[in-house]
Amino acid sequence: MIATRGRGFYEFTDEVTARVRAAKMQTGQVALHLQHTSASLLIQENADPEVRRDFERFFARLVPDGDSLFEHTAEGDDDMPAHVRTALTAVNLTIPITAGALALGTWQGIYLWEHRTAPHRRRVVLHFIGE
Amino acid sequence: MIATRGRGFYEFTDEVTARVRAAKMQTGQVALHLQHTSASLLIQENADPEVRRDFERFFARLVPDGDSLFEHTAEGDDDMPAHVRTALTAVNLTIPITAGALALGTWQGIYLWEHRTAPHRRRVVLHFIGE
Amino acid sequence: MIATRGRGFYEFTDEVTARVRAAKMQTGQVALHLQHTSASLLIQENADPEVRRDFERFFARLVPDGDSLFEHTAEGDDDMPAHVRTALTAVNLTIPITAGALALGTWQGIYLWEHRTAPHRRRVVLHFIGE
């Protein structure tokens, strides 16, 4: 469960790493599934915070809140854009585990990307396979 | 195999759920792979049909049929846009299974999203791992 | 490891097929994970090279190099667009294996899509599950 403070990136690589260690898994994979339709899972660069700000700017321009194109506005003018941003990214990831660790690249971090402007509680299901 | 009537969303959550029950799997995961390059698999909100209409509107604006940018037009002016829409979404998904059921969120449904305007027969391969 | 010559598509379906054969796996799945944040894995049509050229044209228009929107420019004016193109596509794929072969559709090929303009060395981790 990840409590968000509204739109933005919330890294949880360390939490997944801790779960890999607790499972004492050496070789395998972990599947991550986010149980929501207005937030995403994203593996992206975790070094420079400018990158995340640019992501927000780009998606705000690509899928503007309050776009008159959208009919589904009853849940707020950021709701339908949040669904579209989710579809353009992903809600599930599969990451290999090798030598007891996530096989992520040097600059890869695992993020929950909240697309709604209000805070939400987001649930991620992890499933491990391996030995 | 899913027979589509052309562009639009075709939910098949119930079919996947039935396959989970038939496999009597309690804990595991199912990988879904769509064997096509002009249709997608998408997990999205299955409550309000407005949401799917807005998805169609947004993608029709983002990747217009007949865009003069495209060189690959021999298979119809909706073919290259269908490839692009597929790349912007996904052709494979992995969903955890917990307590004998798909670990989907309350509002999540599994859709085949047909991007071609003509009817097509689309094949989805399911692979189960677990016990 | 795939050595790219800069932006473009690099098919490696045959390499994955060879790995499936070497593993003598009959039924299972392979998870592919790309350890980078400025290149993608994409399953797309492998017949007509026009399709890949149109993909490049579309993404060059959607996420232009040197866009003044972007703050993160220290690594080159194609770097932030490369991150966005990666987020809009995927860095991991899961493909079922049936009857000893990848369960790909007739027209599906597996591509590394390099988004940086300069050559790069890209690492893909494969993880097999099955028997």
Image: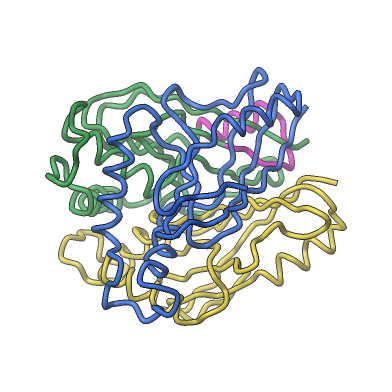
Chain colours: A green, B blue, C yellow
Q: Residue B49 sits in which quadrant?
A: top left
Total marks placed: 0
What residue is at 28 percent from the left and 77 percent from the top? B69
Give percent across and percent down for residue B64: 27, 64
Residue closer to the observer: C49 or C128:
C49
Q: Residue A112 sits in which quadrant?
A: top left
Residue closer to the observer: B62 or C9:
B62
What residue is at 26 percent from the left and 26 percent from the top? A5
Residue closer to the observer: A58 or C121:
A58
Q: Residue B98 sits in which quadrant?
A: top right
Q: Quadrant of the C terminus of chain B?
A: top right
**Relative to B70, does residue B48 appear above or below in the rendering?**
above
Relative to residue A2, is residue B14 drawn left or right? right
Give percent across and percent down for residue A131: 78, 35
**Farthest-out residue, top:** B99
Whether residue B56 is in magenta: the answer is no
Relative to residue C28, is residue B68 drawn left or right? left
Give percent across and percent down for residue C76: 30, 71
**Relative to B7, does residue B95 appear above or below in the rendering?**
above
What residue is at 32 percent from the left and 29 percent from the top? B48
Q: What stretch is highlighted in magenta?
A: A15-31
What residue is at 49 percent from the left and 69 percent from the top? C113
Give percent across and percent down for residue B57: 25, 50
Residue closer to the observer: C14 or C98:
C98
